[in-house]
Amino acid sequence: MPVAPDKSRALAVDALRGLTILVMVFVNQLAGVSGMPAWARHMPADADAMSFVDVVFPAFLFIVGMAIPFALGGRVARGDPPAALQGHVLARTTALLVLGFFMVNAESGYDERWMPWPIAVWELVFYACVLLVWAERPARTEGRGRSALRAAGVLGLLALADAYHGGPDGRAWMTHQWWGILGLIGWSYLIAATVWLLARGRMAVHLLAAAACIAFYAAGHAIEPTSHPGWAAVFAEQAMVCETSLVFLGIVTSELFFGAGSPRVQDGPRAWHPRFARAGALVVALVVAGALLRPAYTISKIYGSPTWCLWSAAICIVLFCGLFVLVDLRGHRGAVRWLDPVAANPLVAYLIPFVVDAALRALHVRLPAALGAGLPGLAFSVAWAFVVLGATALVARRLRLRL
Protein backbone atom coordinates (compact mmCIF):
# COMPACT_ATOMS: atom_id res chain seq x y z
CA MET A 1 0.00 0.00 0.00
CA PRO A 2 1.30 3.50 -0.71
CA VAL A 3 2.60 5.12 2.44
CA ALA A 4 0.20 8.05 2.16
CA PRO A 5 -3.03 7.40 0.21
CA ASP A 6 -4.33 10.33 -1.77
CA LYS A 7 -6.98 12.02 0.38
CA SER A 8 -8.52 13.66 -2.68
CA ARG A 9 -9.90 10.31 -3.78
CA ALA A 10 -11.33 9.37 -0.40
CA LEU A 11 -14.03 11.97 0.25
CA ALA A 12 -16.38 9.17 1.25
CA VAL A 13 -14.20 8.47 4.30
CA ASP A 14 -14.96 11.95 5.63
CA ALA A 15 -18.61 11.59 4.68
CA LEU A 16 -18.92 8.33 6.62
CA ARG A 17 -17.22 9.91 9.63
CA GLY A 18 -19.55 12.91 9.57
CA LEU A 19 -22.65 10.76 9.18
CA THR A 20 -21.54 8.49 12.04
CA ILE A 21 -20.96 11.40 14.44
CA LEU A 22 -24.27 13.05 13.57
CA VAL A 23 -26.20 9.82 14.11
CA MET A 24 -24.29 9.23 17.36
CA VAL A 25 -25.44 12.63 18.67
CA PHE A 26 -29.00 11.77 17.63
CA VAL A 27 -29.10 8.35 19.32
CA ASN A 28 -27.43 9.66 22.49
CA GLN A 29 -30.23 12.20 22.82
CA LEU A 30 -32.87 9.64 21.86
CA ALA A 31 -31.68 7.34 24.66
CA GLY A 32 -33.45 9.58 27.19
CA VAL A 33 -36.76 9.61 25.31
CA SER A 34 -39.45 7.21 26.53
CA GLY A 35 -41.97 5.48 24.31
CA MET A 36 -39.56 4.68 21.49
CA PRO A 37 -39.82 1.37 19.57
CA ALA A 38 -37.24 -1.38 20.07
CA TRP A 39 -35.40 -0.57 16.83
CA ALA A 40 -34.54 2.86 18.27
CA ARG A 41 -32.98 1.39 21.42
CA HIS A 42 -29.87 -0.55 22.29
CA MET A 43 -30.89 -4.18 22.47
CA PRO A 44 -30.65 -5.86 25.90
CA ALA A 45 -27.49 -7.84 26.54
CA ASP A 46 -29.14 -11.25 26.14
CA ALA A 47 -31.57 -10.40 23.34
CA ASP A 48 -29.53 -12.06 20.55
CA ALA A 49 -30.42 -9.14 18.31
CA MET A 50 -29.15 -5.76 17.18
CA SER A 51 -30.81 -2.50 16.21
CA PHE A 52 -29.48 0.31 14.03
CA VAL A 53 -28.51 2.07 17.28
CA ASP A 54 -26.16 -0.83 18.05
CA VAL A 55 -24.23 -0.15 14.82
CA VAL A 56 -23.32 3.49 15.62
CA PHE A 57 -20.38 2.83 17.95
CA PRO A 58 -18.98 0.08 15.69
CA ALA A 59 -19.18 2.53 12.78
CA PHE A 60 -17.01 4.96 14.73
CA LEU A 61 -14.43 2.25 15.41
CA PHE A 62 -14.56 1.25 11.74
CA ILE A 63 -13.93 4.81 10.55
CA VAL A 64 -11.03 5.12 13.01
CA GLY A 65 -9.51 2.16 11.20
CA MET A 66 -10.17 3.59 7.75
CA ALA A 67 -8.41 6.80 8.73
CA ILE A 68 -5.26 5.17 10.14
CA PRO A 69 -3.50 4.58 6.78
CA PHE A 70 -4.19 8.20 5.79
CA ALA A 71 -3.18 9.80 9.09
CA LEU A 72 -0.14 7.71 9.94
CA GLY A 73 0.77 7.29 6.29
CA GLY A 74 1.05 11.05 5.96
CA ARG A 75 3.45 11.16 8.89
CA VAL A 76 5.55 8.38 7.40
CA ALA A 77 5.65 10.27 4.10
CA ARG A 78 6.93 13.36 5.91
CA GLY A 79 9.80 11.30 7.25
CA ASP A 80 8.76 10.90 10.89
CA PRO A 81 11.03 8.31 12.55
CA PRO A 82 9.50 5.17 14.08
CA ALA A 83 9.92 6.45 17.65
CA ALA A 84 8.05 9.66 16.81
CA LEU A 85 5.27 7.71 15.11
CA GLN A 86 4.76 5.42 18.09
CA GLY A 87 5.01 8.42 20.39
CA HIS A 88 2.18 10.08 18.48
CA VAL A 89 0.06 6.94 18.83
CA LEU A 90 0.75 6.74 22.56
CA ALA A 91 0.00 10.44 23.08
CA ARG A 92 -3.31 10.17 21.26
CA THR A 93 -4.22 7.02 23.18
CA THR A 94 -3.40 8.67 26.50
CA ALA A 95 -5.60 11.65 25.67
CA LEU A 96 -8.56 9.43 24.79
CA LEU A 97 -8.11 7.35 27.95
CA VAL A 98 -7.95 10.47 30.15
CA LEU A 99 -11.10 11.91 28.58
CA GLY A 100 -12.94 8.61 28.87
CA PHE A 101 -11.84 8.08 32.49
CA PHE A 102 -12.96 11.52 33.65
CA MET A 103 -16.24 11.40 31.73
CA VAL A 104 -17.17 7.98 33.15
CA ASN A 105 -16.53 9.18 36.70
CA ALA A 106 -18.66 12.26 36.06
CA GLU A 107 -21.58 9.92 35.30
CA SER A 108 -21.48 7.84 38.49
CA GLY A 109 -19.45 6.99 41.55
CA TYR A 110 -19.18 10.54 42.90
CA ASP A 111 -20.62 11.99 46.11
CA GLU A 112 -21.24 15.72 45.90
CA ARG A 113 -21.49 16.03 49.69
CA TRP A 114 -17.72 15.60 49.93
CA MET A 115 -16.76 17.62 46.85
CA PRO A 116 -16.04 21.37 46.80
CA TRP A 117 -18.38 21.89 43.82
CA PRO A 118 -21.45 20.22 42.35
CA ILE A 119 -20.54 17.53 39.84
CA ALA A 120 -21.91 19.65 36.96
CA VAL A 121 -19.46 22.44 37.81
CA TRP A 122 -16.68 19.85 38.14
CA GLU A 123 -17.54 18.66 34.64
CA LEU A 124 -17.49 22.16 33.16
CA VAL A 125 -14.06 22.82 34.65
CA PHE A 126 -12.93 19.49 33.20
CA TYR A 127 -14.01 20.48 29.69
CA ALA A 128 -12.24 23.83 30.10
CA CYS A 129 -9.06 21.94 31.00
CA VAL A 130 -9.52 19.73 27.94
CA LEU A 131 -9.50 22.86 25.78
CA LEU A 132 -6.36 24.17 27.46
CA VAL A 133 -4.49 20.92 26.92
CA TRP A 134 -5.66 19.74 23.51
CA ALA A 135 -7.09 22.68 21.57
CA GLU A 136 -5.11 23.90 18.57
CA ARG A 137 -3.59 27.31 19.21
CA PRO A 138 -3.36 30.32 16.91
CA ALA A 139 0.14 31.20 15.76
CA ARG A 140 0.53 33.99 18.32
CA THR A 141 0.31 31.52 21.22
CA GLU A 142 3.01 29.19 19.92
CA GLY A 143 6.07 28.49 22.04
CA ARG A 144 6.00 29.50 25.67
CA GLY A 145 2.40 30.69 25.58
CA ARG A 146 1.19 27.37 24.25
CA SER A 147 3.22 25.43 26.81
CA ALA A 148 1.87 27.62 29.63
CA LEU A 149 -1.74 27.00 28.59
CA ARG A 150 -1.19 23.27 28.39
CA ALA A 151 0.54 23.24 31.76
CA ALA A 152 -2.42 25.12 33.25
CA GLY A 153 -4.78 22.54 31.78
CA VAL A 154 -2.77 19.62 33.16
CA LEU A 155 -2.65 21.24 36.61
CA GLY A 156 -6.40 21.78 36.37
CA LEU A 157 -6.98 18.10 35.64
CA LEU A 158 -4.83 17.14 38.62
CA ALA A 159 -6.79 19.53 40.83
CA LEU A 160 -10.08 18.04 39.62
CA ALA A 161 -8.81 14.56 40.36
CA ASP A 162 -7.87 15.68 43.87
CA ALA A 163 -11.30 17.28 44.37
CA TYR A 164 -13.14 14.11 43.37
CA HIS A 165 -14.72 12.11 46.20
CA GLY A 166 -17.02 9.12 46.17
CA GLY A 167 -18.09 6.14 48.20
CA PRO A 168 -20.26 6.06 51.32
CA ASP A 169 -17.75 8.02 53.40
CA GLY A 170 -16.32 10.24 50.67
CA ARG A 171 -12.92 8.56 50.78
CA ALA A 172 -13.16 6.77 47.44
CA TRP A 173 -11.41 8.22 44.40
CA MET A 174 -12.14 7.99 40.70
CA THR A 175 -12.49 4.37 39.62
CA HIS A 176 -12.26 2.37 36.43
CA GLN A 177 -15.95 1.49 36.11
CA TRP A 178 -15.58 1.06 32.36
CA TRP A 179 -13.40 2.86 29.85
CA GLY A 180 -16.13 5.01 28.37
CA ILE A 181 -16.67 5.42 24.62
CA LEU A 182 -13.54 7.51 24.16
CA GLY A 183 -11.46 5.16 26.30
CA LEU A 184 -12.58 2.13 24.32
CA ILE A 185 -11.67 3.94 21.12
CA GLY A 186 -8.30 4.80 22.64
CA TRP A 187 -7.37 1.20 23.45
CA SER A 188 -8.58 -0.07 20.08
CA TYR A 189 -6.66 2.69 18.30
CA LEU A 190 -3.47 1.84 20.21
CA ILE A 191 -3.64 -1.83 19.26
CA ALA A 192 -4.57 -1.30 15.61
CA ALA A 193 -2.26 1.67 14.96
CA THR A 194 0.70 -0.19 16.48
CA VAL A 195 0.06 -3.18 14.24
CA TRP A 196 -0.30 -0.87 11.21
CA LEU A 197 3.09 0.72 11.94
CA LEU A 198 4.61 -2.76 11.93
CA ALA A 199 2.71 -4.17 8.95
CA ARG A 200 1.87 -1.06 6.87
CA GLY A 201 -0.02 -2.16 3.77
CA ARG A 202 -0.01 -5.90 4.37
CA MET A 203 -3.72 -6.58 4.22
CA ALA A 204 -3.31 -10.20 5.25
CA VAL A 205 -1.71 -9.11 8.54
CA HIS A 206 -4.66 -6.89 9.40
CA LEU A 207 -7.16 -9.61 8.50
CA LEU A 208 -5.27 -12.01 10.75
CA ALA A 209 -5.24 -9.38 13.49
CA ALA A 210 -9.03 -9.04 13.22
CA ALA A 211 -9.35 -12.82 13.48
CA ALA A 212 -7.00 -12.81 16.49
CA CYS A 213 -9.24 -10.28 18.25
CA ILE A 214 -12.21 -12.60 17.81
CA ALA A 215 -10.15 -15.60 18.91
CA PHE A 216 -9.20 -13.67 22.06
CA TYR A 217 -12.90 -13.18 22.80
CA ALA A 218 -13.58 -16.89 22.24
CA ALA A 219 -10.74 -17.86 24.58
CA GLY A 220 -12.01 -15.53 27.29
CA HIS A 221 -15.54 -16.81 26.83
CA ALA A 222 -14.36 -20.40 27.33
CA ILE A 223 -12.68 -19.72 30.67
CA GLU A 224 -14.55 -20.40 33.89
CA PRO A 225 -13.64 -17.47 36.21
CA THR A 226 -14.06 -19.42 39.45
CA SER A 227 -11.83 -22.26 38.24
CA HIS A 228 -9.18 -20.12 36.56
CA PRO A 229 -9.25 -16.64 38.12
CA GLY A 230 -5.78 -15.77 36.83
CA TRP A 231 -6.64 -16.49 33.22
CA ALA A 232 -10.00 -14.80 33.64
CA ALA A 233 -8.17 -11.63 34.66
CA VAL A 234 -6.00 -11.85 31.53
CA PHE A 235 -9.10 -12.03 29.33
CA ALA A 236 -11.14 -9.52 31.35
CA GLU A 237 -11.23 -7.06 28.45
CA GLN A 238 -12.34 -9.64 25.89
CA ALA A 239 -15.17 -7.44 24.61
CA MET A 240 -12.87 -4.45 24.07
CA VAL A 241 -10.36 -6.59 22.20
CA CYS A 242 -13.13 -8.10 20.06
CA GLU A 243 -14.32 -4.58 19.20
CA THR A 244 -10.81 -3.80 17.97
CA SER A 245 -11.54 -6.15 15.07
CA LEU A 246 -13.74 -3.35 13.70
CA VAL A 247 -10.73 -1.03 13.55
CA PHE A 248 -8.67 -3.64 11.75
CA LEU A 249 -11.50 -4.25 9.26
CA GLY A 250 -11.64 -0.50 8.68
CA ILE A 251 -7.92 -0.58 7.87
CA VAL A 252 -8.50 -3.51 5.52
CA THR A 253 -11.25 -1.58 3.72
CA SER A 254 -8.93 1.41 3.21
CA GLU A 255 -6.20 -0.88 1.91
CA LEU A 256 -8.65 -2.68 -0.34
CA PHE A 257 -9.82 0.52 -2.03
CA PHE A 258 -6.74 2.72 -1.82
CA GLY A 259 -3.88 0.25 -1.64
CA ALA A 260 -1.15 -0.39 -4.15
CA GLY A 261 -2.33 -0.26 -7.74
CA SER A 262 -5.72 1.27 -6.99
CA PRO A 263 -7.18 3.35 -9.85
CA ARG A 264 -7.86 7.06 -9.84
CA VAL A 265 -11.35 8.47 -9.45
CA GLN A 266 -11.15 9.99 -12.93
CA ASP A 267 -10.57 6.53 -14.39
CA GLY A 268 -14.31 5.96 -14.04
CA PRO A 269 -16.52 3.46 -12.19
CA ARG A 270 -15.50 0.53 -14.38
CA ALA A 271 -11.91 0.74 -13.19
CA TRP A 272 -13.13 0.30 -9.61
CA HIS A 273 -15.23 -2.80 -10.26
CA PRO A 274 -12.53 -5.24 -9.02
CA ARG A 275 -12.28 -3.27 -5.75
CA PHE A 276 -16.03 -3.42 -5.24
CA ALA A 277 -16.00 -7.15 -6.04
CA ARG A 278 -13.39 -7.75 -3.35
CA ALA A 279 -15.35 -5.61 -0.90
CA GLY A 280 -18.45 -7.66 -1.69
CA ALA A 281 -16.55 -10.87 -1.06
CA LEU A 282 -15.35 -9.48 2.27
CA VAL A 283 -18.91 -8.55 3.24
CA VAL A 284 -20.13 -12.06 2.43
CA ALA A 285 -17.27 -13.59 4.42
CA LEU A 286 -18.07 -11.41 7.43
CA VAL A 287 -21.78 -12.22 7.30
CA VAL A 288 -21.10 -15.97 7.00
CA ALA A 289 -18.48 -15.90 9.79
CA GLY A 290 -20.89 -14.00 12.02
CA ALA A 291 -23.66 -16.50 11.34
CA LEU A 292 -21.37 -19.41 12.19
CA LEU A 293 -20.31 -17.79 15.47
CA ARG A 294 -23.79 -16.66 16.48
CA PRO A 295 -24.93 -19.93 18.12
CA ALA A 296 -21.93 -19.86 20.45
CA TYR A 297 -21.90 -16.17 21.37
CA THR A 298 -25.24 -14.66 20.18
CA ILE A 299 -25.52 -11.06 18.95
CA SER A 300 -24.81 -8.61 21.73
CA LYS A 301 -23.57 -5.05 21.71
CA ILE A 302 -23.33 -5.09 25.51
CA TYR A 303 -21.12 -8.18 25.53
CA GLY A 304 -19.17 -7.05 22.44
CA SER A 305 -19.84 -10.39 20.75
CA PRO A 306 -18.05 -11.48 17.54
CA THR A 307 -21.24 -11.66 15.47
CA TRP A 308 -22.16 -8.10 16.44
CA CYS A 309 -18.68 -6.92 15.45
CA LEU A 310 -18.55 -8.80 12.15
CA TRP A 311 -22.04 -7.89 11.02
CA SER A 312 -21.52 -4.27 12.02
CA ALA A 313 -18.33 -4.20 9.95
CA ALA A 314 -20.21 -5.67 6.99
CA ILE A 315 -22.85 -2.93 7.28
CA CYS A 316 -20.13 -0.27 7.46
CA ILE A 317 -18.43 -1.58 4.33
CA VAL A 318 -21.73 -1.46 2.42
CA LEU A 319 -22.36 2.10 3.64
CA PHE A 320 -18.87 3.18 2.63
CA CYS A 321 -19.27 1.65 -0.83
CA GLY A 322 -22.53 3.52 -1.33
CA LEU A 323 -20.99 6.82 -0.24
CA PHE A 324 -17.90 6.21 -2.38
CA VAL A 325 -20.06 5.71 -5.47
CA LEU A 326 -22.19 8.77 -4.68
CA VAL A 327 -19.48 11.19 -3.58
CA ASP A 328 -16.26 10.14 -5.28
CA LEU A 329 -17.22 8.28 -8.44
CA ARG A 330 -20.35 10.22 -9.38
CA GLY A 331 -19.13 13.52 -7.97
CA HIS A 332 -22.18 14.40 -5.87
CA ARG A 333 -20.04 16.17 -3.26
CA GLY A 334 -22.84 18.58 -2.41
CA ALA A 335 -25.00 15.71 -1.14
CA VAL A 336 -22.75 15.34 1.91
CA ARG A 337 -21.00 18.71 2.14
CA TRP A 338 -23.31 19.71 4.99
CA LEU A 339 -21.62 17.03 7.10
CA ASP A 340 -18.21 18.73 6.79
CA PRO A 341 -18.23 20.44 10.23
CA VAL A 342 -18.72 17.23 12.19
CA ALA A 343 -16.53 15.21 9.79
CA ALA A 344 -13.61 17.59 10.35
CA ASN A 345 -14.23 18.08 14.07
CA PRO A 346 -15.67 14.82 15.42
CA LEU A 347 -14.45 15.27 18.98
CA VAL A 348 -15.88 18.78 19.23
CA ALA A 349 -19.24 17.53 17.96
CA TYR A 350 -19.18 14.59 20.37
CA LEU A 351 -18.40 16.76 23.41
CA ILE A 352 -20.81 19.65 22.77
CA PRO A 353 -23.89 17.77 24.10
CA PHE A 354 -22.01 16.84 27.28
CA VAL A 355 -20.93 20.44 27.84
CA VAL A 356 -24.47 21.72 27.28
CA ASP A 357 -25.93 19.09 29.60
CA ALA A 358 -23.45 19.98 32.36
CA ALA A 359 -24.19 23.69 31.93
CA LEU A 360 -27.94 23.14 32.18
CA ARG A 361 -27.52 21.05 35.33
CA ALA A 362 -25.18 23.61 36.86
CA LEU A 363 -27.82 26.29 36.23
CA HIS A 364 -30.63 23.98 37.44
CA VAL A 365 -32.39 24.29 34.09
CA ARG A 366 -34.55 21.42 32.87
CA LEU A 367 -35.97 20.86 29.43
CA PRO A 368 -39.78 20.58 29.16
CA ALA A 369 -41.00 17.10 30.08
CA ALA A 370 -42.79 16.84 26.72
CA LEU A 371 -39.41 16.64 24.96
CA GLY A 372 -38.59 13.43 26.83
CA ALA A 373 -41.32 11.23 25.42
CA GLY A 374 -42.95 10.09 22.18
CA LEU A 375 -42.95 11.99 18.91
CA PRO A 376 -41.99 15.34 20.48
CA GLY A 377 -38.94 13.66 21.98
CA LEU A 378 -38.06 12.05 18.64
CA ALA A 379 -38.44 15.37 16.81
CA PHE A 380 -36.33 17.14 19.41
CA SER A 381 -33.60 14.48 19.08
CA VAL A 382 -33.46 15.05 15.32
CA ALA A 383 -33.44 18.83 15.79
CA TRP A 384 -30.78 18.57 18.48
CA ALA A 385 -28.45 16.66 16.14
CA PHE A 386 -28.66 19.50 13.64
CA VAL A 387 -28.20 22.10 16.36
CA VAL A 388 -24.97 20.33 17.30
CA LEU A 389 -24.00 20.28 13.63
CA GLY A 390 -24.46 24.05 13.43
CA ALA A 391 -22.75 24.64 16.77
CA THR A 392 -19.78 22.57 15.64
CA ALA A 393 -19.48 24.70 12.50
CA LEU A 394 -19.46 27.87 14.61
CA VAL A 395 -17.06 26.56 17.23
CA ALA A 396 -14.69 25.14 14.62
CA ARG A 397 -14.06 28.62 13.23
CA ARG A 398 -12.06 29.38 16.33
CA LEU A 399 -11.40 26.02 17.93
CA ARG A 400 -10.21 22.56 16.96
CA LEU A 401 -9.42 19.67 19.23
CA ARG A 402 -6.52 17.54 18.06
CA LEU A 403 -5.64 14.46 20.09
Image (spheres, rainbow, N blue to C red):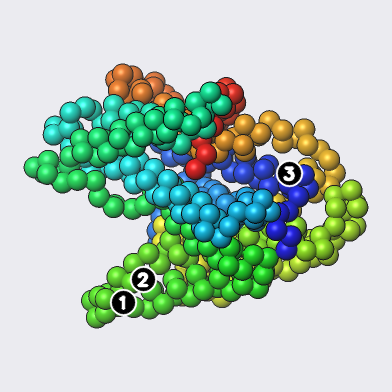
Q: Nearer the viewer, residue 357 or 349?
A: 349
Q: Which three-letter amino acid code belongs to the residue tagged 1? A: Trp
Above/below status of 242 relative to 26? below
Identify the residue shown where x is 55% and y is 71%: 209
Question: Marks 1 and 2, Cα distance to the nearest angstrom?
Answer: 6 Å
Question: Marks 3 and 1, Cα distance to the nearest angstrom?
Answer: 44 Å
- Residue 93 location, x and y as percent? 45, 51
Dot 3: element: helix
Total number of numbered discs in the rendering:
3
Q: Residue furthest left?
A: 169
Relative to residue 73, is residue 272 drawn left or right?
right
Any part of residue 295 in sight = no
Any part of residue 216 in sight = yes
Identify the residue shown where x is 41% and y is 77%: 219
Q: Which three-letter amino acid code belongs to the residue tagged 3? A: Leu
Above/below status of 198 relative to 90? below
Identify the residue position indicated by label 3 in the image: 11
Identify the residue position indicated by label 2 in the image: 235
- Residue 243 location, x and y as percent? 49, 61
Q: Residue furthest bottom?
A: 227
Nearer the N terminus, badge 2 or badge 3?
3
* Mark identifier at residue 231: 1
Dot 2: element: loop
> Mark 1 and 2 residues: CB-CB less than 8 Å, in contact?
yes
